Amino acid sequence: MTATEPATDVTPASTGPLVSQLKHGLDAPICLTWELTYACNLACVHCLSSSGRRDPRELTTAEAKAVLDELRDLQVFYINIGGGEPMIRRDFFEIVEYAISNGIGVKFSTNGAFIDSKAARRLAAMDYLDIQISLDGTDADTNDSVRGSGSYATAVRAMENLRDAGFEGFKISVVVTRHNVDQLDEFQALADSFGATLRITRLRPSGRGADSWHELRPTLAQQRTIYEWLLEKGDNVLTGDSFFHLNALGDGSPESHLPGLNLCGAGRVVCLIDPIGEVYACPFVMHDEFRAGSVRDPGGFTSVWRESDLFLSLREPESAGACASCGSYDACQGGCMAAKVFVGLPLDGPDPECGGGEGELAMADAGPRPTASADHSKPARVPVTLTRR
Amino acid sequence: MLDAALELHPKVAVRPEPFGALVYHYDTRRLVFLKHPDVVRVVESLSDHDNLADVLTACEIDERRWPAFDRAVTSLYESEMIRDRD
C-alpha cells in the first residue's frame, strides 16, 4: 500500500463509504508485494521473511514473467519487489524490465549492496521505477545492531551512487524501533540531503521479528511520539498506511487522523507473493495460516485472489470482538492482524500496540505464539579455532 | 471547468471496479478512487467532445448534478490526472 495516496473524494453522488467497499475486496489488488528470493547477504534481526538462503523451489524467470503477464491483464498498477535481497537474483533486471515494459510500475526494496555505480546508472535510466534503500539508524551503531555489521556504510554508498547517477527521489525506508524513534528528524534531514523521500514503517513481530520484536518495539510513550511526529511533520513522509492503529490516539476528528485508507488491506486490496509462488494475505503474515494458494496452482494468481477461501473470508465483515466497546474502534479498526497473531493475541483482540494500552494488558494473558512455518535463515556460524598441530 | 476541452493524461490508467474505478498516474504515482460509475463514463469520454458540458450532456448526466461533476473533474485536473487538450 506504500504509494497509495490518500483517497481523493471525487464522489458526486455517494455510493456509500469507500472503505466499506474496499473491505469487500477488489477484482485485483491495488498493488502487491513480491519477495523475489529468500537469498540475502544480510541477516537483519527483524526480517519479515526470515531470509538468508535461497530456496531451490524459487520461481524461474519464465514463471515470474507468466505471473507478470497475469498482473498486466489484471491491471495491477505497480508491484513492490523485495526479498531477501532481490538484486541477488541474476535475472533481477530482466524481471524488472519485463514488468515495466508491461505497464507495471516497480518499487523495490534493497539493502544497497549491489548498487555500484554501474547498476545505479542502469537503474537511473529506467522509468516507473522506485527504489527503497533500507536503513534503520542514522548512524552505523544504531543501524548495524539491527541490520548487521557494515550495512550502514553499504546503504550510504548505494545512496551516493544513486545520487551521482542522477536517480532522483529514491526512498529511505526505515523500520521504526525503540532505538531509532528519536532519530526521525535526523532521518528526514538525511533524506533531504540526498533529495530522497523518507518512508517509515511499523515493526512487525513477523518472521525473525517474532524473536526481536519484544526488544525492539517502540514503548507506549514512543508510539505517541511517532503519532505526533507524523501529524506534525509527516506530510511528505510515506508510511504504507503502516501506523493506522495509532489513530486511536486522536480525538476522532478528521485532523487527528493520519493520512491513508485506515484499514487492514490484507487479502482485500493487497497481498504477497513469496519467492516460491505462495500467495499470502499480506507481507507480514508469511505463515501457513494465511496462505491462500500458489501462483503455480491451476488458475494461477487470478484464481487465488478471486476465489481462495482465505481471501473470501478476509473480505467478510470482521468482529470488533474485545474492542467492540472501545470508543476508538472506528479510528483504529482494531489494528494489525499480523501484529496480533504473532504475539499470541486473538484476531478480534486489541492490537498489541494499542494506543490505549489494551494490548499491553492483553499480552499478559496471551496464548502461545504460532511456530514459524518456514525459516530460510542462514545457519549460525560455528566459530572454528585453527590450531597448530 | 464546463467550457474546458479536456483529456485524460497519457500517463494515467483507469481500472474499472464495482464501485467505480481506480485511477493511477504512472508519473506522479498518485492513486485516486472514482466512486461512481457515472464519473468513470465522464472521465473516459472527455476527449470525445468539445468541452466538459458536452461530455456531461452526452453521458446523460442530469444538470442538477453538474456542479458535483464540475468539482470532481476540477479535483482530477488539479491532481494532473486530466489535462487541457491542445
Image (cartoon, rainbow, N blue to C red):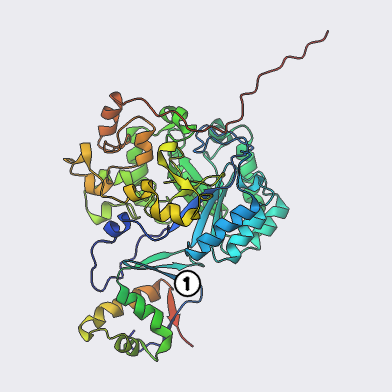
Residue A303, quarter of picture: bottom left
**Residue under numbered circle 1:** B12
Tell me the SS state at disc 1.
strand
Picture coordinates of residue B54, whole percent (x, y):
33, 90
**Extreme residue toward the front, this view:** A298
Which residue appears at 83% of the width and 7% of the height? Answer: A389
Q: Looking at the rendering, in which quadrant would you find the N terminus of chain B? A: bottom left
Picture coordinates of residue A147, whole percent (x, y):
56, 35
In the shown orientation, is residue B43 left or right of residue A317? right
Name which residue type carries label 1. Val
Picture coordinates of residue A103, whole percent (x, y):
55, 66
Which residue appears at 47% of the width and 41% of the height? Answer: A175
Residue A164, quarter of picture: bottom right
A285 to A316, vertically: above or below: above
Residue B80, quarter of picture: bottom left
Front residue of A81 and A42: A81
In the shown orientation, is residue A362 left or right of residue A157? left
Front residue of A193 and A240: A240
Picture coordinates of residue A2, whole percent (x, y):
45, 53
Q: Chain of mark 1?
A: B
Front residue of A127 and A304: A304
Which residue appears at 61% of the width and 36% of the height? Answer: A42
**Extreme residue toward the right, this view:** A389
